[in-house]
């Protein structure tokens, strides 16, 4: 089903401190991630997440699941929103899926995530 929260991303200045803070606060597990900024994959009891460094004062991004990224991006634009011109990260879509940042028709940012094909 499309539309449910699928992934979240937290940006911090120092990823080591970020892992210590969020790990102690929520009991999350961290494993190495694909980010060049000391990123991690976050293991939670709910939806998966990511943490990346070099992003002081960032606001967390929430990614909503879509079944067809291209169709979802076209729909965002049809509704008056906008989409970034490039997909996020250097990750392999076959392993992590596709991620795009979008802005709604009022200027609020959100993300879309198309999971990898089974």
Image (cartoon, grey):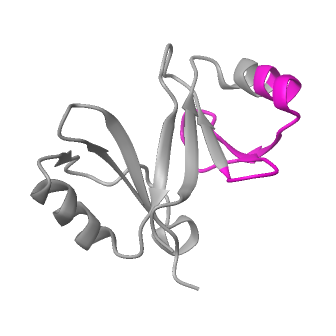
Image location (x, y in percent) of residue 17: 74, 18
Image location (x, y in percent) of residue 118: 59, 86
Q: How many marks?
A: 0
Out of 97 and 27, give the one closest to the viewer.
27
Q: In which quarter of the view is residue 22 placed?
A: top right
- 97 to the left or right of 111: right
Out of 56 and 60, give the one closest to the viewer.
60
Q: In which quarter of the view is residue 16 placed?
A: top right
- 5 to the left or right of 101: right
Image location (x, y in percent) of residue 39: 62, 38
* Residue 71 inside the magenta-drawn segment: no
Q: Which residues are magenta?
A: 20-48
* Vertical relation: 8 (above or below) 23: below
Q: In which quarter of the view is residue 108 placed?
A: top left
* Residue 41 inside the magenta-drawn segment: yes
Find the residue positioned furthest to the bottom: 118
Q: Which residue is depicted at the point 53% across and 60% down? A: 4
Out of 89 and 46, give the one closest to the viewer.
46
């Amino acid at each position: 089903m499309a539309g449910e929260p699928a992934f979240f991303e937290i940006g911090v200045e120092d990823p080591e401190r970020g892992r210590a803070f969020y790990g102690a606060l929520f009991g999350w597990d961290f494993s190495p991630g694909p980010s060049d900024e000391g990123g991690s994959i976050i293991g939670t009891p709910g939806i998966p997440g990511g943490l990346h460094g070099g992003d002081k004062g960032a606001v967390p991004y929430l990614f909503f699941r879509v079944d067809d990224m291209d169709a979802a991006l076209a729909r965002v634009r049809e509704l008056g929103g906008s989409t970034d011109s490039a997909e996020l990260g250097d990750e392999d879509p076959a392993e992590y899926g596709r991620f795009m940042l979008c802005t709604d028709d009022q200027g609020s940012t959100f993300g879309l995530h198309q999971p990898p094909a089974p």
